[in-house]
Structures are given as C-alpha cells and as structure tokens.
Amino acid sequence: MTPPATRAPARAEVRKTYKLYIGGKFPRTESGRSYEVTDSRGRFWANASQGSRKDARDAVVAARGAFSGWAGATAYNRGQVLYRVAELMEGRRAQFVDEVSRGEGITRPQAERVVSTAIDRWVWYAGWTDKVAQVAGNANPVAGPYFNLSAPEPTGVVAVLAPQDSSLLGLVSVLAAPLVMGNAVVLVSSRDRPLPAVTLSEVLATSDVPGGVVNVITGDAAEVAPWLASHSDVNAIDLAGAADLDWAALEARSAGTLKRVLRPRDGEVDWAATPSGPARILFFTETKTVWHPKGR
Amino acid sequence: MAKMGTFEYAPAPESRSVVDLQPSYGLFVDGEFVDAAGTSFKTINPATEEVLAEVGEADAADVERAVAAARRAHTRVWSRMSGAERGKYLFRIARIMQERARELAVLETLDNGKPIKESRDVDVPTAAAFFFYYAGWADKLDHAGFGPSPRSLGVAAQVIPWNFPLLMLAWKIAPALACGNTVVLKPAETTPLTALLFAEICQQADLPPGVVNIVTGAGPTGRALVEHPGVDKIAFTGSTAVGRGIAQQVAGSRKKVTLELGGKAANIVFSDAPLDQAVEGIVNGIFFNQGQVCCAGSRLLVQEDVATELVERLERRLMTLRLGDPMDKNTDVGAINSRAQLDRITELAAAGDAEGAVRWSAPCELPSKGFWFPPTVFTGVSNTHRIAREEIFGPVLSVLTFRTPDEAIAKANNTPYGLSAGIWTEKGSRILWAADKLRAGVVWANTFNRFDPTSPFGGYKESGYGREGGRHGLASYLHSEGDDL
C-alpha cells in the first residue's frame, strides 16, 4: 500500500548516480549536464549524464589505447572474457529485469525473457571468438610456389549507436558483435532509456573486459554521433540507433575518413531473433592476406 | 633507346602490326558499338605522344542508355540464367583473351606506356586468369559461405584506373558477372583501348547484349555513372580523394560500395634479411609499372645497421634497369602514363628536395618525346616529409630507417593508408609477428607485388573497403545475409 504523500517512508532508499563509463572509470560528463530519464509512463526516474563531444573524444582515446591489447589477446581468452559478462549479468538479473520492464513498459515476465535472451546473446557471441577466422578465412591456392592465407582481423575503434527502443537486448546485440574479434567500442546509449546501458557498464567494469575496450556514453546520439562520425581515429560506425535520425548525414560525415558504415535497417528490427550467422561480427573486420614464398 | 647499364642490347621491338587500330571508337552499349552523344577525346601513346585514336565521351544520356541496357539484361536474361550457363560465357571470355593475348598486350603497352614484358607476362595472363577463376564460381555460389541462396545485386557501376587497364577491368567484371550482375564499366580517360577491345571479345563470345556495357570518358562520365539512381552497386579503384567523394555521394542510399584506393606501403627490411633478394623485392615493389601501383612499396624501412649497404646495392641494381621504348622486350622501365601524372611526380619529388631529403636518380638518358621519370631514391627521409606521407604513384622510393622491430611497426602503421606492406627477414617467427601487427590488407613476406585471382586484395583504413579476388571477392557482388543486419 502506498503511504500518504505527506509522510516519509520508514527508510529513504539510497539512489544511484548514473554516470558515463570511459577507460574503465565512471566519470560524470565533462559538460556537467544531466537530463531527466522517465519511466515508460513518463514519471521521473533518474537524472542521467548527458554526454558531450568532449566525452566522445575522451572515449575514443581510451578505446584506441585499449585496442591493441584486446585485439592481441588470444581468441580463447576473448571468448572466456565475453562469457564472463554473461555470468555476471545473470547475477544482476533482477536489476536488469526491473530496468527493462520500467523503461520499456513491458510486463515482468516479458522483461525476464528479454534479459534471458540478452544473457544468451553474450554466450552466443562469446562462442564465436575462436571460430570466425575458421569460417571466414581460408588458404588461397595461388598459381605459384607461395603460402597464401586470408583471415579476418578487427577493424579498430568502432562507434556504436545503440538502438533507441530495445534498451538492453538491442544494446547487447550491437555491442557484443564488434567485441568478438577484438575491436574497441565507443557506444552511445538509447537516449530515452539509458539506464540498462549504465548498469551493463557496471557489469563490464567488474568483468574481465579490460578498461577502455567498451566505453559507454549516455545522452543524445543526435548530438554526439556527428563527432564520432567525423573523428579520424574511429574506423567504423554502426548506425543502428540512428534509424530515426538523419543517418544519411552521419554516413556522409563518415566518408571523410572512409569509415566502414553499417546503415540502420528499414523498419523494425527483431532483436530477439538469434542472428542467422556471423555477419555482424564480420562487418567490423578486415581481411588480411599474407604471402610467403615456398622453397627448399 | 636510352641505356643505364654497361651492356649493349640490340633493339628487340615487339611488332605493333598485330593491333588493328581504328581512327575512332564509340561506346559499347547493349551489345553494339554506338556513337557517343557527347563529344570525343584523343587517347595518346605516352611514350611518344602520338595520337592513337579518337574516343567517344559518354554524357549523362549515354550513361542512362547503358544503365537501362544493363538493367534489361539483368532482369530478362542474366539473373535468370543458370550459374552453369553464366560460367560458360566467362570461360569463353577467358579463352578468347588468351587467344588474343598478344594483341591485348601490344594495345595495352601502346595506350598505357608500360613495358611490353609486363603487359605480356603479367597484365594480360592475369586478366584471363581472373575470368577463368570466377567462371568456375558461377554455379557454386551456394557453397561460398555467404549464407543460403545468395543472389545478385543487379546493375554494377564500375570505374577503373589507368595503371592496369585490362587487369582492373577483369578484377571488376569477372566476379560481377559470375554472381549474376550486369555491368556498366568506365575505363580511365587515358587508357580506354583495351576495354574497347574487350567489348569486341564479348561480341565474339556471344555474351548476351547489355550484360557488359563500356562507357568511355573522364571524371564527369564516371560521376554520372556513380550517381545514377538505377545502379545497385559501385566498385571503384582509384584515388582516395575520389573514393571519399563516392562514399559521400552514396550516403543515405542502399547502394553497396567497394573502394580500392591509395596506399603508402612500408617495405620493411630487417638486418637479417637476405639482402640480394630484398633488393629484387624492393625494385619490384616500387619500380614495377613505373611505381604507378596503389600497393607499391613506396616507403622502404631499413634496419639502421644494414641501411648503407642495402642502399648501395639497390642503387647498383637500379643502374642495370633499362628505361625506354615500352615496346622493346628488353625494357624494364616504361613511360609515365600522362603529362598530368608526370607533373605530380615531379612536384612531389621537388618537395622531397625542398624538405631536405637526398635525391639519387639512376643515370639514364630520357627520351625526348613522351613522359618519363627515372628510377629515383630519396634517402634521409623522415616520417613527416611529404614524400613519406603522400602517395606519389611514380618510380620514387623514400628510404627511412629504424632500430627496433617495434619502431618498424610503429613507423609502418603511421599512415592513414593500409593497403599493403612488405617484410624481409630470415626469421620465421618475426615474419608472423610483423604480419600480425601491420595494419594492411595484403602483407608480402620475402616477396612483393604478387597477385592472383584466388587471393583477396584490398585495404584497411583510408585505402578503402571490400575485397577483390578470391572467395572473399564474391561478397562484393552478392546480396547475402550480411546486407540485412
């Protein structure tokens, strides 16, 4: 029973300050701004950090610094690290269910299913780390005495605009894919539903994902994404969360440094469906071909 | 014939009588040669500045007709044909190219200026091999690993450069057709002739009309083609500047794009490298095709303790290169493709002087007519020099030094480009370590500038995206699950 508004609760709960996640730390936005996050019925829920251009640039620096270590880790190691994210999410299940249900306006049983699928999505991607090179790479039978091998490598620093609606499952789907092969990610959360991204940051911070490999900026993609699209140290950008923004303009800005651009899909995306293959992983890879002569 | 070595060679010119040059050429649209609605331009022999032919300049209306022909051919014929049948046409084309290899080689050398031994031994046979390789894929696409039931994209707009005119045509057309697409291809303004001879080969092969269309012209023709709303795919090989423009232009569309752009490859020589082999690799890396190669090894990174000896051996070797008549079978270094390109090389080399690098050029007499630049080596180059950062696209090598393997990798990767790289060392573990660290799409270890139809080629970073060649090259021309993310 809700107590009368005039009376204080027996104990005031300790509320969380929602911050950014950059370089393995939780800074407030450099801009000092916050914005109101409401639940699905429009009631005040929290103040989230409103990430800025400077935050995005700091995140790119952190991602670049973390890239070579993560890309250079063994595939087996990356697989275990990503699997551990699933383990830790399971431990925070109640919190995710609460946030998804409250933010997306779905029932608790529905939110339970969303969280379960999101956790399973990490497991699915974790299992790919040491298999992608086997299904997407191959020896090339060149017409000469040469050893010739092609294999995928991570593209580098990837900017990801997380889906606006699917605040956890969509988020996990677009984040896990580029991590598989060793990219470092700067992610901009859903604007209106940023809290699962913050909670996931806390999971990542206590997992074995090295600091800087994932950086999370909450706020408005419309404001932050143009700077990521034109940043010369970002190699690729996933526009999943820009479907309702002027994504053509973001793609045009990305052309300046010839970023790989993953365009948003037309229409609604069913994030609950298991991906039909490793295509999203492969989008953020480069094929490297190595030649060496054979001889006695 | 100018000579650089001490031995005299008798002239050994290839006969040009094998080529039947027409005074003027039209466009190839819907299976027929037609006059361009626009104006015409001259294509010249860059070794002599002699006019070879008048070529039609396709305008927007011509491009419209070509795209419409390609669309019709895709809808009515090519996309409905079984893969096995499509493949047989490609096999046929490969065979006719082999039959007419000598003619193609002579025409390529006349129009491009490259030595006949290169067009004869590399460009033409490799072009035919591309058709032969992709012919076999046409009925095996379900097994290529791109998901179930991959299908063609539709009409491909293809724009190619002047450095390997016929070979670049083959890289573009062979996989596109194997996957069931039809094409409109624009050859470079200065080298249209082998593409037009290829059109004749398509006629001899009875390729259905409209499957291959060739529109000649310069930048505006290419722009009209790329911007045409009726094309589904754009494949471009050329400068990074133009590639950026294309990436910008297609923004917001659903067109699929492959870009193969510039490079500034590091060729790294460790002190334990077999130096004589390395010298051959360096020469091949930067002087093959007069250095007009996007993946040229234009930055030589030498470990400090062998730098002096290596540069001495390199300069000695360069003095034996024979520069001159590209039609002579003994010629190693041919003509620069155009006055504009020669001017760019000259300007960048002057910047090398101005910024304090030390220039050495092979002492050879340059022919009085045509466009020529001697094999040139700059030493004392630092990473900040323009000749270490900008693509010269000419026979100019910049030599830098390093002390540790980590420094070599850092310097090699210190460029916005990422097309290719070279490694020279006898130590196997170091090769594999360096190959992992280099951010480049093709890494040649103890070799350089090797190409094969089965082997994917393409860049990292600002050298573009997508791969050409090999199984991976199919993905550029197929609609597969990766396009529905």
Image (spheres, grey):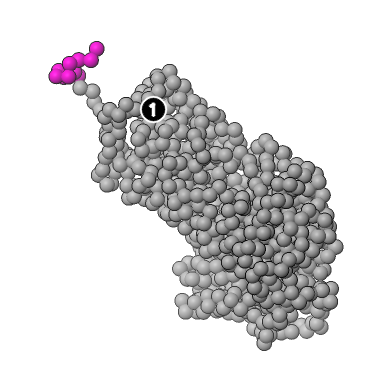
> Residue, x 44% and y 51% (percent of image)?
A249
Q: Residues within 10 Å of mark 1 (few under 14, many from 20)?
A: some
**Residue at the disc numbered 1:** A104
Q: Does residue B89 appear in the picture of this structure?
A: yes
Q: Residue at x 14, y 19 (%)?
A: A6
Between B482 and A29, the one nearer to me in the picture: B482
Q: Which residues are drawn in magenta?
A: A1-11
Q: Residue at x 39, y 51 (%)?
A: A227
The correct choice, above or below, for B460 with respect to A28 in the image is: below
Q: Is residue A46 left or right of residue B249?
A: left
- Magenta-colored segment: predominant secondary structure: loop
State which quadrant residue B83 falls in: top right
Q: Position of residue A163 (x, y in %)?
A: 44, 37
Say which amino acid is labelled 1.
Answer: Glu
Q: Residue at x 70, y 62 (%)?
A: B214
The vertical placement of B441 against A115, above or below, is below
Pinpoint residue B2: horizontal percent, then vertical percent: 71, 84
